[in-house]
Image: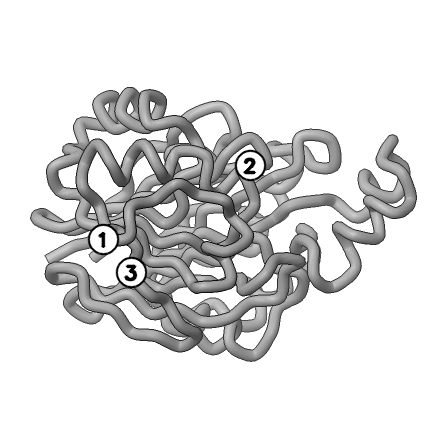
Amino acid sequence: MSLYITSLNSGSNGNCYYVGNETDAIFIDAGISCRETEKRMRRLNLSMDKVRAIFISHEHTDHIKGVAVLAKKYRLPVYITAATLQYAGLLLNDHVVMPLHGNAVINVGELVVTAFPKLHDAADPHSFMVSYNSINIGVFTDIGSPCEQLIHHFQQCHAAFLETNYDEEMLEKGRYPYFLKNRIRGGKGHLSNAQALQVFRDHRPSFMTHLLLSHLSKDNNNPELVQNLFTEHANGTEIIVASRFGETAVYCVS
């Protein structure tokens, strides 16, 4: 009676997160190619036959690159808001498009998926919590700042993918132009290491077993730095950095 989770890829070059039980699974976002998704699933001994749906958080390319081919090849429904679909430019058959609304609760096989709005510079961005047998997995990336909804759902999670996009000092001293730095840290961009750590320290439930640090910037963060930062405050939670270069292991959450 467990959930199994992995990050197939996490970063500005593509995002795809897998959550499933023994019979049913979903993808949150599909930002790497269908071929690469299949390769990584095979390496992890995960079956595409269990994948029942794709949920789209927002329309940025690194979250939707593989959606159209995956949906067509595996006949997968795609849960997406009307505004996200409008701005995504996806070529999807009408019959695979499933409506998604803020604070929606959707049943996919034995899984229950809860969507809620988040702060990000996109048309209608959402985060997700996936539940089964009273186990909750959160997928919380591309967040400008930690709103009350994020905190509410994080407090219920047995495991979570939480954005740690940038180190504030690295961003400030880095090569990015000023307007881009402000976009990243301006409240509708991305979550810093410090912001994410505060969420974790202040709101981590005692039963959280795994935290996957996600969507790290290639230029403004360092995997070892953020691993050490969170490990110092882990209190029994396993800390994993989700890579932009490959899949993580599969973690069993029960």
* Number of the front mark, 1 or 2: 1
Label 2 crowd bin: few (<14), some (14–19), many (20+), radius 10 Å: many
Determine whether the residue tagged by mark 1 lies in a helix, strand or loop.
helix
Residue at left 53%, top 62%? 125
* Amino acid, disc 3: Met
Please tell me which residue lies in front, 130 or 242: 130
Specify the label residue 150 is tagged with. none
Which color scheme did the rendering employ for the protein? one colour
Specify the label residue 95 is tagged with. 1
Is the Cβ of the residue at disc 1 closer than 8 Å to that at disc 2? no
Please tell me which residue lies in front, 227 or 179: 179
Label 1 crowd bin: few (<14), some (14–19), many (20+), radius 10 Å: few
Quarter placement of the N terminus? bottom left
* Number of the front mark, 3 or 2: 3
Please tell me in which quadrant of the rendered image residue 178 appears: top right
Of marks 1 and 2, which one's residue comes earlier in the chain? Answer: 2
Gap in angstroms between the C-alphas marked 3 and 2: 26 Å
Determine whether the residue tagged by mark 2 lies in a helix, strand or loop.
loop
* Amino acid, disc 1: His
Is the Cβ of the residue at disc 1 closer than 8 Å to that at disc 3? no
Of marks 3 and 2, which one's residue comes earlier in the chain? Answer: 2
**Residue 168 at what x, y percent from top left?**
79, 48
Which residue carries the number 3 mark? 98
Which residue carries the number 2 mark? 11
Gap in angstroms between the C-alphas marked 1 and 2: 30 Å
Is the Cβ of the residue at disc 3 closer than 8 Å to that at disc 2? no
Quarter placement of the C terminus? bottom left
* Amino acid, disc 2: Gly
Residue at left 62%, top 68%? 146
Image height of 24 relative to 198, above or below: above
* Number of the front mark, 1 or 3: 1
Residue 12 in sight from this viewpoint? yes
